Every structure is written in structure tokens, then in C-alpha cells.
Image (spheres, grey):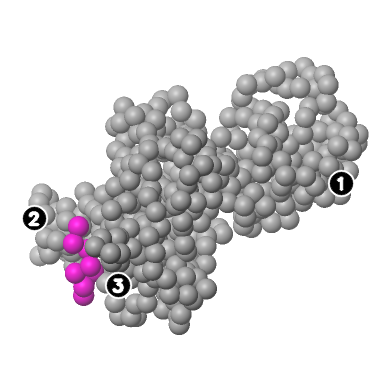
């Protein structure tokens, strides 16, 4: 073959390789780090183990294998896969450290093409998979892009009921003596912002999910920056901005440009433009597929307020997936995501007979978005998974009955066998919480050998949904 012919052949072969970027999103404690660790682990073991029977490419013996390769973006932290594996294989096994900033990992997946030009031109093809991990709390900031400081403040202050009002007591007491019309004092604003941030941390620790702004609790490289030092504040009389969008022209009533209120408003606007918008422009415009991890179980046990707070936060996240022509995300970022998967995590913390209810409950939560996505030709699905298994399912005998049960080791090292209870098939009604007997118990991951893939539930089904069409 001539030199030109060889170059043409190599170019054709390279053009047959494909590339997909998958964003992994999840609310706090949903298991993002465990999910990515398991996904990578399953693919790396695919050449030596039959661990992915529901992945069509593997079932048809067309999956050659996968390996880690250097990522393209050298300014993004490497996902800590090796560290996660060390924790999972420790004695006793431990869960990987949760996500606190953006990270990325790239895999090269080699497979035999099933049909078409790929099969004719080369024996194997390569799919380059980029998996991007970032804190779910940051995703909750997207609605800020379409809210003025006044609107955001009003929303935040209106939510101060129940547990939130109790947790905000210190910050609210300080706000009673705060005069926003006086000349700005940076030290005073920093101190009050610290109290507001502490309130957000307490909300998160109490099992609440609607924590906004998200960077306040997970600042990343912005820790200590003035752009994270603002808080909700009622507009002084005569200074209320009546705009419905930050894009509209300002009205005539502006606060004194040197006042505390003006500083708070300016910092909020800088947060909108320099933090939130830049983050979404950099990452969202490059995603092809997205998986949203949801822990429905802990909020079920925590009670009505925690569950509905999680549901509200999930609805805010789903604003990111409304892809109509008038949608904010489409206007700003030209997102090209064509598949979204919602996964109910920790399915191994309920007995297998409850998995269908778990999926049904999640479907109820995302139903409005599902309808909109279907109209816009965006494919969506729901399933229950356990990225890394922590329990073994079985039965216990009670008299003449065999009762489903789980067996595992708690985080405190106590072996336990139990039936956690029933998962509601639909969104719980008010009377459910009066008789709720569901019990969520956190377990350690199951022990596994270094040369074996991590035990999982339906990770192969996840891979088929997200990548199956790319591996044909």
C-alpha cells in the first residue's frame, strides 16, 4: 500500500472511533463516587469476567475490554479511582470519600462492530468515554440564572418554616439588627454570610436537600472568596427591583451604590455570571448523556419534611432537562444531551420484592419532566441500582412463613439481618407519615477481592442504556 493509501486508511480508522461524555449528577449522599468507581471497575474487568450480562455488546462477545487513558482536559482534577478502590478493599471495607469538586476520568472501550461501515473498515472500534463528576449541590444553582436578587431573597425567606426556621435562628437574630441602607462594611457582611453558610450546612446535616447557593456548602476553589459572601435580604423601601429577569433593563429605583444592600446585590449578580453561568457553559454544553442518582430511602425514614425537601430539590434539578426552545438551558448553553437516566440508588438496602415500588416512586417524582422530555425527543428512563452491593438478600423463617430479609454489616461493624419495610409505590399521602415503619440502615460495602469486579445490581443495565447504541 502506498504512503498516501496508508494515511487514508489510518484516517478512516480513526474516524470510526467515537466519543461520549457522561455527566453524573446526584443530590447529597446519593452515591456519585461509588457509582463512578463501580462503572469504571466493571468495564476494566470486562475482558476477564462475565460481569455485564445485560450489556448487549458483552453478551454478544463483542466487548474486547477497556483501559484507562489520559483525560483531555488537564485543568480538571483526575477522578480518584485508585483511592476509591483502596477504601473499598480496606479491612474492613469503607465507602469512598464523597465528591467535593469537579473531576473526570476517561476510558477507552474496545469492541467489535456489529454492522455497517465500522465492521467493514476495521476489526475493532474504540469508544472513548469521559465521565464527569461534580457536586449535585451545584446543579441546584441553575434557577438562580433566571432570578433577581430580590426574587431569590423572597424565595429563601419564605422557606424559613419548620426545621429550617429553627436552624436559621442565629442568622435571623443577627439580621434583626442589620441595616442594609448603611454604608457597606465588608467585615460585617462576611460575618453574617458565615452565619448564613452555617445555616445551610446545618440544613444539609439535618437531611435536607434544597441547599442554595450550592457553592456555599461545597465551595471548591472559591473558598473564602467574596463572591460567596452574600445572603438573602429584604429590599429597603423604595429600592425594590421589579424586574422579572436579570436580563431585563434595570428600573429607576436603585439602592445607594455604597450601601450594604448594593454590595449584596452586586455579589449575587457576580455569582450568577462568574460562577453559575461559567460552570454550565464550560461543562453542560459538552455532555451527551446524563445520569441522575437519587437516594429515595433515607428521606423516607427521615420523615415528611426531609422527603418533600428532597422532592423539591429533584424538581429544581430537572429544570436542567427541559429542552424546549424557550428553555433557559437551551438558550444559554446549547446542550446536546439526548438521553437522561434517573437511578434510585442503594436498592440493595431494601429487599428485592420492593425494587419495583422503588422505581415506581421515582417515576412519580420525575413524571412531569418525563412528559416534556418525550415531546422534545429526549429519551428518559428510571431504574433501581446498587452501584456497589452492601447486603445479601435472602429469607428468614418465622413459623411457617418465609419473610424476605437483608443481611449485612452496619457502618459500626455490627452484623445485622432485617426486613427494612415496604417502599410506597406512589408519592406518600399525609397519613403515610403517621404510620411510617420504614427503616433505613446504612451498611458497609461487601468484601471483594482485588482481582474481582465489585458486586453490583444492574450496573450492566445502566451501561446498556447509556452506551449500548454507541457499542454497535
* Image-based side of 373 in relation to 297, left or right: left
Q: CA distance from mark 1 to mark 3?
A: 53 Å
Sequence-wise, the earlier of marks 1 and 2 is 2
Q: Is residue 287 above or below residue 250?
A: below
Q: Quadrant of residue 153 in the image?
A: top right
Please state which of the two labelled residues, at mark 1 or mark 3, is closer to the viewer. Answer: 3
Residue 263 picture location, percent across and down: 80, 37
Residue 418 picture location, percent across and down: 39, 64
Q: In the image as oriented, which residue stretches furthest toward the bottom?
A: 91
Per the rendering, the mark at residue 432 is none
Q: Nearer the viewer, residue 405 or 349?
A: 405
* Image-based side of 4 in relation to 394, left or right: left
Per the rendering, the mark at residue 188 is 1
Q: Nearer the viewer, residue 257 or 88?
A: 88
Q: Which residues are magenta?
A: 46-54
Q: Residues within 10 Å of mark 2 (few under 14, many from 20)?
A: few
Query: Is 315 contained in the magenta span?
Result: no
Query: Is 48 contained in the magenta span?
Result: yes
Q: CA distance from mark 2 to mark 3?
A: 33 Å
Dominant SS type (magenta): loop
Sequence-wise, the earlier of marks 1 and 3 is 1
What residue is rendered at 25% in x and 60% in y? 401
Check disc 3 and report the residue beneath it.
453
* Image-based side of 194 in relation to 471, left or right: right
Per the rendering, the mark at residue 120 is 2
Amino acid at each position: 500500500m502506498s504512503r498516501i493509501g496508508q494515511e487514508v486508511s489510518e484516517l478512516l480508522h480513526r474516524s470510526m472511533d467515537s466519543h461520549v461524555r457522561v455527566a453524573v449528577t446526584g443530590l447529597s449522599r446519593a452515591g456519585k463516587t461509588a457509582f463512578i468507581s463501580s462503572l469504571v471497575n466493571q468495564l476494566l474487568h470486562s475482558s476477564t469476567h462475565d460481569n455485564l450480562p445485560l450489556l448487549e455488546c458483552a453478551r454478544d462477545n463483542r466487548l474486547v475490554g477497556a483501559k484507562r487513558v489520559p483525560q483531555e482536559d488537564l485543568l480538571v482534577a483526575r477522578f480518584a479511582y485508585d483511592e476509591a478502590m483502596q477504601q473499598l478493599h480496606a479491612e474492613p471495607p469503607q465507602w469512598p470519600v464523597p465528591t467535593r469538586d469537579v473531576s473526570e476520568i476517561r476510558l477507552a472501550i474496545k469492541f467489535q462492530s456489529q454492522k455497517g461501515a465500522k465492521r467493514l473498515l476495521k476489526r475493532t472500534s474504540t469508544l472513548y468515554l469521559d465521565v464527569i463528576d461534580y457536586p449535585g449541590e451545584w446543579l441546584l444553582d441553575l434557577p438562580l440564572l433566571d432570578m433577581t436578587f430580590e426574587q431569590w431573597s423572597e424565595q429563601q425567606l419564605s422557606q424559613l418554616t419548620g426545621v429550617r426556621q429553627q436552624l436559621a435562628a442565629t442568622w435571623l437574630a443577627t439580621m434583626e439588627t442589620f441595616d442594609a441602607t448603611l454604608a457597606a462594611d465588608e467585615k460585617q457582611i462576611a460575618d453574617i454570610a458565615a452565619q448564613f453558610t452555617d445555616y445551610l450546612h446545618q440544613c444539609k446535616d439535618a437531611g435536607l436537600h434544597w441547599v442554595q447557593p450550592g457553592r456555599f456548602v461545597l465551595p471548591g476553589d472559591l473558598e473564602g472568596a467574596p463572591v460567596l459572601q452574600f445572603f438573602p435580604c429584604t429590599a429597603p423601601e423604595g429600592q425594590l427591583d421589579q424586574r422579572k429577569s436579570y436580563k431585563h433593563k434595570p428600573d429607576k429605583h436603585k439602592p445607594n451604590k455604597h450601601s450594604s444592600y448594593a454590595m449584596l446585590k452586586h455579589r449575587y449578580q457576580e455569582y450568577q455570571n462568574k460562577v453559575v453561568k461559567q460552570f454550565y457553559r464550560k461543562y453542560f454544553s459538552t455532555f451527551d448523556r446524563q445520569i441522575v442518582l437519587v437516594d429515595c430511602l433515607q428521606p423516607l425514614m427521615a420523615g415528611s419534611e426531609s422527603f418533600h425537601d428532597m422532592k423539591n430539590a429533584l424538581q429544581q434539578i430537572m429544570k436542567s432537562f427541559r429542552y424546549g426552545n424557550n428553555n433557559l438551558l437551551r438558550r444559554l448553553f446549547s446542550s446536546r444531551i439526548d438521553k437522561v437516566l434517573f437511578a434510585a440508588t442503594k436498592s440493595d438496602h431494601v429487599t428485592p420484592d420492593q425494587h419495583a415500588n422503588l422505581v415506581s416512586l421515582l417515576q412519580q417524582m420525575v413524571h412531569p419532566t418525563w412528559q416534556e422530555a418525550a415531546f422534545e425527543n429526549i429519551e428518559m428512563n428510571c431504574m433501581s441500582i446498587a452501584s456497589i452491593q452492601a447486603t445479601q438478600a435472602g429469607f428468614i423463617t418465622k413459623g411457617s412463613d418465609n419473610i424476605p430479609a437483608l443481611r449485612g454489616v452496619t457502618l459500626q461493624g455490627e452484623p445485622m439481618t432485617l426486613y427494612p419495610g415496604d417502599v410506597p409505590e406512589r408519592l406518600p399521602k399525609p397519613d403515610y407519615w403517621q404510620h411510617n415503619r420504614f427503616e433505613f440502615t446504612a451498611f458497609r460495602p461487601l468484601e471483594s477481592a482485588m482481582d474481582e469486579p465489585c458486586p453490583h445490581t444492574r450496573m450492566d443495565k445502566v451501561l446498556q442504556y447509556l452506551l449500548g447504541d454507541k457499542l454497535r
